Amino acid sequence: MAKLPKEYRFLDLSDYGRTPGHWIASKLQFTPLTAIHVTTLFVITGFIAIGCLLNGYMITAAFFLILKSILDAADGELARLKKTPSYVGRYYDSIADLLLNFCFLLSFWYITEISIIYMLIAFLGIQLQGTLYNYYYVILRNSVQGDSTSRIFENSTPKAFAGESQATVKLFYTIYNVLYICFDKCIYYMDRNARYSKPYPKWFMTLISLYGLGFQLLLMALMLVFELQSFVIPFFIGYTLLILVFICIRKLIL
C-alpha cells in the first residue's frame, strides 16, 4: 500500500524492496505475525549480513543487505495491510536501522583497517543523509494527506494507537529521541522552512531518494559484489556533501 496519493507518487530509488516486501506482507496478512515480528526478522538478517562480511563472504553479505531492505519495506506494508499502525513499530524500525548502520560501518572498518575516525564520520554522514530524505519525505506525506505515522517534528511522545501501550510508546520514543535528536535538529536548522513549500515535485523527491536507506544499502551491496569494500567508508563521507546540493535546490528553486 502506497504512502502517498497516486498523483504525488514518485520514482523512489531507495524503495526497490516495496514490491517484494508487499508480496511478503500479503502472505503474512492473515497470520499471527505482526509488523514488529518482521522488523525483528530484518534485524536478524542484518546481523547475518555482518557475519558474512566478517568471514569474507562478500556476495552473500550483499544478498542479505538487499534482503534486509526488502524486509524493511515489508514491515510497514504488513502494518498497513492489517490496518494496525503503531508508534512502537515506527520507532523500533528507526532504532534498529541506526544500530545496524553503525554495525555495518564498524564491520567495514574492521575488515579494511581504515581509521576509526573516518568510520565515525561516515556513520554520521549516513545518518544525516537518511534524515534529510526522511525530513522531506515526511513533509510531503503530511502535506498531501499521505501516511502520517511519521511526524515532521518528533518533539513529544505521541498518543498510542489502539492496541498498543502508552508506556511502551513512551519508552521507544525516548530511545528514538536520544539517538536521532542531533540528526533531526541539524537537518531542521539547515532548512527550517522546508515545511512551508508547496508539495515537492516528483523529480526532486527522486533525487532525494538517493539518500534513502534502501539505496545506501544497495550501494554497499554493489561495492561488495565488485570487491570494493575498502571504498565504502570513504565513499559515504564524500557522498554526504550532496546534502548541501539538495538543500540549495530546495531553497533556491522550490
Image (tube, helix red, strand yellow):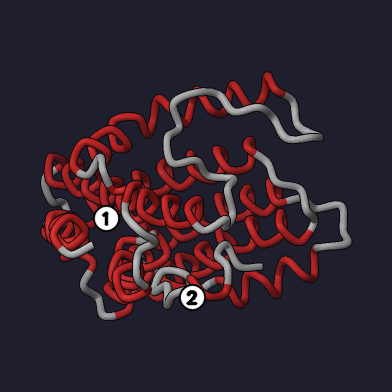
Residue type at mark 2 is Tyr
Residue 59: x and y in percent read: 40, 76
Residue type at mark 1 is Phe
Q: How many marks?
A: 2
Vertical arrangement, residue 238 with respect to residue 34, above or below? below
Q: Are marks 1 and 2 in contact (CB under 8 Å)?
A: no
Secondary element type, mark 2: loop
Residue at 37% of width from left, 61% of height from top?
212
Q: Circle 1 is placed at which residue position? A: 108
Q: Circle 2 is placed at which residue position? A: 16
Q: Kindly indicate the quadrant of the structure image that contains residue 247.
A: bottom left
Viewer can see residue 55: no
Within 10 Å of the Cα at label 1, are there few (<14), some (14-19), or many (20+) other Cα atoms?
many
71 left or right of 241 in image: right
Vertical arrangement, residue 210 with respect to residue 197, above or below? below
Looking at the picture, tell me which residue is in the foreground, 165 or 140.
140
Residue 145: x and y in percent read: 57, 55
Residue 192: x and y in percent read: 25, 40
Residue at 13% of width from left, 51% of height from top?
114
**Foreground: disc 1 or disc 2:** 2
Mark 1 or mark 2: whose residue is earlier in sequence: 2
Task: Check the picture and name the quadrant holding the C terminus.
Answer: bottom left
Looking at the picture, tell me which residue is in the foreground, 86 or 51.
86
Residue 203: x and y in percent read: 31, 76
Q: Kindly indicate the quadrant of the structure image that contains residue 193.
A: top left
Secondary element type, mark 1: helix
Viewer can see residue 117: yes
Task: Check the picture and name the quadrant holding the N terminus.
Answer: bottom right
